[in-house]
């Protein structure tokens, strides 16, 4: 994927996610059940943590430092998700929202600083995949993966507030 296509996809994906959040009250964002036991706040903290993981490891690799493992098994993903959930569940909503928006701005700045050949080139972790695939996995696909949960939860919330069964 070319840089301008990646930027457009990142912006469009985030716009879809933001549209699903539009109009939610803080109480709604803190209520469990948006995805299993997770609240909307928990989902946003999770997405943020994942994107921070990508950016942190990209910066480390670019500086020649040891980066964390970038391809995780299903069990490792689950363990990481639970770790992040425990770390962020008590974080105030305002901070989670600030982080959610801030990491996205940083993600866009990083991609803006790349060239097409950088995104098409091999990843700095030596996994033999194009760098663009990590932005796809850790940001684009990940946000798209959680969007249906948010939309279904919003639909259930609307049904409940209308008194429908």
Image (tube, grey):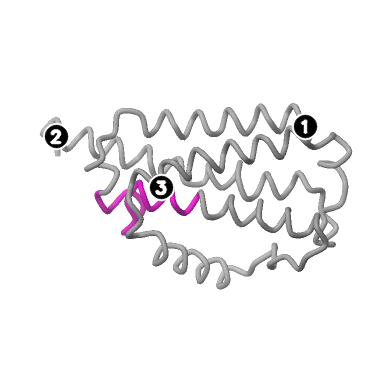
Secondary structure state at the residue bearing disc 1:
helix
Q: Which residue is drawn at the image coordinates 44% and 41% (left, top)?
A: 98
Q: Is 29 positioned to the left or the right of 151 in the image?
A: left
Mark 2 packing: few (<14 Cα in 10 Å), some, or many (20+)? few
Q: Which tag, 2 or 3, sits closer to the chain's start?
A: 3
Secondary structure state at the residue bearing disc 2:
loop
Q: Is 157 positioned to the left or the right of 101 in the image?
A: left
Q: Is 102 positioned to the left or the right of 6 in the image?
A: left
- The x, y position of residue 23, in whole percent, is 30, 28
From where the camera sits, is residue 164 visible?
yes
Q: Which residue is drawn at the image coordinates 50% and 28% (left, top)?
A: 15
Q: Which residues are magenta?
A: 31-47
Q: Which residue is mark 1?
A: 3
**132 lies above or below 1:** below
Q: Which residue is mark 3?
A: 96
Q: Nearer the viewer, mark 2 or mark 3?
A: 3
Most distant residue in the left direction: 163
Q: Which residue is drawn at the image coordinates 78% and 59% (left, top)?
A: 61
Q: Which tag, 1 or 2, sits closer to the chain's start?
A: 1
């Amino acid at each position: 994927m070319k840089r301008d296509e990646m930027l457009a996809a990142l912006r469009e994906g985030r716009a879809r996610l933001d549209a699903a959040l539009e109009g939610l009250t803080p109480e709604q964002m803190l209520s469990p059940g948006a995805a299993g036991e997770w609240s909307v706040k928990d989902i946003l903290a999770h997405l943020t943590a994942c994107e921070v993981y990508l950016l942190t490891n990209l910066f480390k690799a670019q500086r020649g430092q040891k980066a964390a493992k970038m391809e995780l098994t299903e069990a490792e993903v689950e363990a990481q998700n639970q770790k992040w959930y425990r770390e962020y569940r008590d974080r105030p909503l305002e901070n989670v929202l600030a982080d959610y928006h801030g990491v996205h701005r940083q993600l866009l700045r990083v991609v803006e600083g790349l060239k097409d050949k950088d995104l098409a080139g091999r990843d700095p972790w030596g996994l033999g995949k194009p760098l663009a695939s990590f932005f796809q996995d850790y940001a684009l696909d990940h946000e798209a993966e959680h969007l249906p949960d948010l939309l279904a939860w919003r639909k259930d919330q609307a049904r409940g507030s209308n008194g429908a069964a």
